[in-house]
């Protein structure tokens, strides 16, 4: 998924700071005057809290004040990926194997650009493998415009675990 030169610059500015705080950068997005930093804890057992977001926001604001990479007015938002987490990096497709996903690609395959199915994984030659209701599908990673988890089963699992606990 393509990033703008500004988003790439911002990623370089923020990556170390976010890592030092114990988080992983999921995505940097700058659209319509909103700079969104999406991060998650490196420790998968931790949940992202408002305090975590505030801490990253304060540190990012200091960096932005010092470096001044955005010349126009903007609003800074720090968020967690949430349950319908976007799949951005190649590693995400390995990490979330077995989950239901929604993928949109830039070119049609058999008349379709949008696919919904169970993520089998990503091959060494960058093919995203899905098991869909109309059979297996292989999508070029380079064609992905957007991909995210379908939270349906994730929410069901959380409800079941709460009922048991």
Image: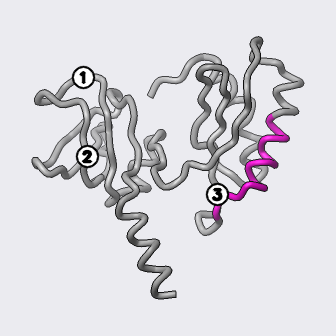
**Mark 1 touches mark 2? (CB < 8 Å):** no
Majority secondary structure in the magenta region: helix
* Distance between the alpha carbons at the discs numbered 3 and 2: 28 Å
**Mark 1 touches mark 3? (CB < 8 Å):** no
Q: Which mark is residue 116?
A: 2
Of mark 1 and mark 3, the one earlier in the sequence is 3
Residue 22 image offset from top left, x and y in percent: 73, 55
User: 6 left or right of 145?
Assistant: right
Q: Identify the magenta region.
A: 47-60
Of mark 1 and mark 2, the one earlier in the sequence is 1
Of mark 3 and mark 2, the one earlier in the sequence is 3
Residue 93 image offset from top left, x and y in percent: 39, 48
Residue 129 image offset from top left, x and y in percent: 25, 46
Q: Which mark is residue 42?
A: 3
Where 88 falls versus 130 (above or below)? above
Write down the residue under mark 1. Answer: 107
User: In front here: 136 or 53?
Assistant: 53
């Amino acid at each position: 998924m393509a990033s703008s030169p500004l988003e790439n610059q911002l990623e370089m500015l923020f990556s170390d700071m976010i890592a030092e705080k114990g988080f992983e950068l999921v995505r940097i997005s700058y659209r319509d005057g909103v700079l969104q930093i999406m991060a998650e804890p490196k420790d998968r057992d931790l949940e992202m809290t408002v305090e975590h977001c505030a801490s990253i926001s304060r540190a990012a604001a200091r960096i932005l004040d010092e470096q001044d990479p955005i010349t126009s007015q903007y609003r800074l938002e720090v968020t967690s990926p949430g349950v319908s987490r976007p799949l951005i990096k190649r590693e995400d497709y390995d990490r979330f194997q077995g989950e239901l996903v929604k993928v949109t690609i830039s070119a049609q395959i058999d008349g379709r650009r949008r696919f919904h199915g169970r993520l089998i994984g990503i091959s060494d030659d960058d093919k995203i493998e899905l098991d869909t209701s109309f059979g297996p599908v292989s999508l070029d990673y380079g064609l992905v415009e957007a991909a995210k988890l379908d939270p349906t089963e994730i929410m069901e699992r959380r409800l079941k675990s709460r009922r048991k606990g």
